[in-house]
Image (cartoon, rainbow, N blue to C red):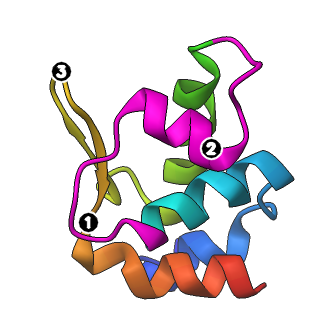
């Protein structure tokens, strides 16, 4: 199995529209924590179940790697700096 960072990117299925919207929010908010409410609002997920963000994050982590998005307890999530370039590549694909 290829252990390179891009191995996950090349073998993963493309992101859905909602997953891409969530990832774009993280790119737009680089360096800061994004709450569930802000993520839902900015990604256009307001009308969906509040746990939908969680399932979208699972899919994004599957593509970018488990350490790509850090959970900040009781506050939200943050895109890790090391994952920014990969996130941009996924969005551009």
Asked if one can make out residue 89 in the rendered structure from this viewpoint, the answer is: yes
Residue 59's disc is 2
Residue 80 figure quarter: bottom left
Start and end of the magenta stretch?
A: 28-49
Nearest-to-viewer mark from 2 and 3: 3
The answer to whether 44 appears left or right of 22 in the picture is: right
Nearest-to-viewer mark from 1 and 2: 1
Residue 59 locus on image (x, y percent): 62, 43
Residue 51 locus on image (x, y percent): 57, 15
Nearest-to-viewer mark from 3 and 1: 3
Q: 10 Å neighbourhood of mark 3: few (<14), some, or many (≥20)? A: few
Circles 3 and 1: CB atoms closer than 8 Å: no
Residue 53's disc is none
Q: What element carries label 1?
A: loop
Residue 10 figure quarter: bottom right
Q: Which residue carries the number 3 mark?
A: 74
The answer to whether 2 appears left or right of 20 in the picture is: left
The answer to whether 63 appears left or right of 68 in the picture is: right
State yes or no: residue 37 in magenta: yes
Q: How far apart are marks 1 and 2 (CA)?
A: 16 Å
């Amino acid at each position: 199995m290829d252990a390179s960072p891009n191995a996950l990117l090349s073998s993963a299925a493309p992101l859905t529209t909602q997953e891409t919207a969530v990832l774009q929010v993280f790119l737009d908010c680089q360096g800061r924590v994004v709450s569930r409410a802000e993520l839902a609002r900015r990604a256009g997920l307001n009308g969906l179940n509040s746990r939908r963000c969680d399932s979208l994050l699972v899919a994004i982590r599957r593509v970018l790697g488990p350490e790509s998005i850090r959970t900040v307890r009781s506050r939200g999530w943050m895109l890790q700096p090391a994952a920014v370039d990969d996130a941009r590549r996924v969005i551009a694909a």
